[in-house]
């Protein structure tokens, strides 16, 4: 960015913007930053053709109107400006999931894990902004917005070893798969009877204590392009 570069932090979360402000202040860079609370599909506080680069990471997956977001990226960029985004393609992982929970094989309690999964899929996939798109849609929306020199890097990983942050189930069950979802503990309470919950938790505790390997399935897309 050089010695005079400026950064606009934009997000729907006031808490996240406050954390960005805190970190910028700690680095002595606050005077080079601006903070705007806005969604990616409505960057109303940022004027037309006023920025050189738009970059996001795992943002559009939470945005219902993704095509509008691309239009906003195009609007705020100067001619020759570039966008660079990274998004997980959750629909791929969802299709490959099978009898897995937290990367652990739960075939022995598949009836229970299926009930828990239904808590997370209560919204039909076609209406769920986290599932109703893939890398081809991102490419199509970028081109429709007017971007050129669009490049897409796509990576899929199937059953790749993944260490968990802890093997303590009492800690793991308080984790949420994403910021919009209930924790595993909350999902179990919603989906299962007390007896069913005990059975599933007993299986998971035993698997974790035995050091059973955990694996993940994930797909990601990295997209970039230029405003002509």
Image (spheres, rainbow, N blue to C red):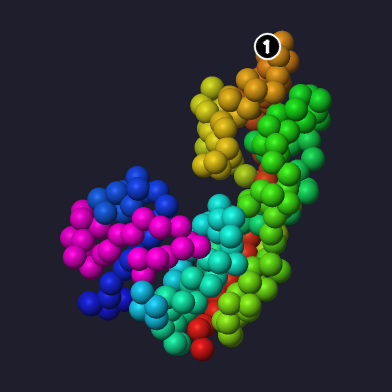
Left or right side of 93 for 73: left
Left or right side of 201 for 79: left
Q: Is residue 182 above or below residue 1?
A: above
* Residue ID at (51%, 89%): 228
Work out whether residue 171 can be spotted: yes
Identify residue for label 1. 194
Q: Where is residue 86 shown, x and y percent of the image?
A: 55, 63
* Residue ID at (63%, 27%): 187
Work out whether residue 213 can be spotted: no
Q: Where is residue 109 shown, x and y percent of the image?
A: 79, 24
* Residue ID at (21%, 53%): 26
Q: Is residue 48 above or below residue 38?
A: below
Label total for image: 1
Q: Where is residue 175 shown, x and y percent of the image?
A: 53, 33
Q: Quadrant of residue 189?
A: top right
Q: Where is residue 62 shown, x and y percent of the image?
A: 56, 52
* Residue ID at (36%, 70%): 46
Mark 1 Cα-neighbour bin, 10 Å: few <14, some 14–19, many ≥20: few
Left or right side of 79 for 207: right
Figure quadrant of the N terminus: bottom left
Residue 38 inside the magenta-drawn segment? yes
Residue 12 inside the magenta-drawn segment? no
- In terms of depth relative to the viewer, which is nearer, 51 or 177? 51
Q: Quadrant of residue 220?
A: bottom right
- In terms of depth relative to the viewer, which is nearer, 100 or 126? 126
Judged from the image, the secondary structure of the residue bearing numbered disc 1 is helix
Q: Is residue 221 above or below residue 169?
A: below
Left or right side of 153 for 112: right
| Magenta residues, start to end | 24-46
């Amino acid at each position: 960015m050089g010695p005079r570069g400026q950064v606009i932090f934009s997000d729907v979360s006031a808490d996240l913007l406050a954390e960005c402000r805190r970190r910028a202040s700690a680095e002595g860079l606050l005077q080079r930053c601006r903070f705007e609370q806005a969604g990616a599909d409505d960057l109303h506080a940022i004027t037309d053709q006023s920025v050189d680069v738009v970059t996001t990471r795992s943002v559009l997956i939470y945005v219902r109107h993704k095509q509008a977001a691309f239009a906003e990226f195009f609007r705020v960029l100067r001619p020759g400006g570039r966008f660079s985004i990274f998004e997980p393609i959750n629909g791929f992982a969802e299709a490959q999931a099978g009898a897995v929970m937290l990367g652990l094989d739960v075939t022995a309690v598949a009836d229970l894990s299926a009930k828990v999964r239904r808590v997370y899929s209560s919204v039909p996939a076609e209406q769920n902004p986290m599932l109703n798109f893939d890398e081809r849609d991102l490419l199509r929306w970028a081109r429709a917005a007017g971007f050129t020199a669009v490049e897409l890097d796509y990576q899929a990983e199937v059953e790749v070893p993944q260490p968990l942050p802890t093997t303590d189930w009492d800690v793991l069950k308080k984790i949420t798969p994403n910021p919009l979802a209930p924790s595993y503990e909350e999902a179990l309470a919603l989906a299962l009877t007390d007896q069913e919950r005990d059975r599933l938790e007993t299986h998971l505790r035993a698997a974790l204590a035995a050091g059973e390997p955990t694996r993940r399935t994930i797909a990601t897309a990295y997209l970039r392009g230029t405003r002509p």
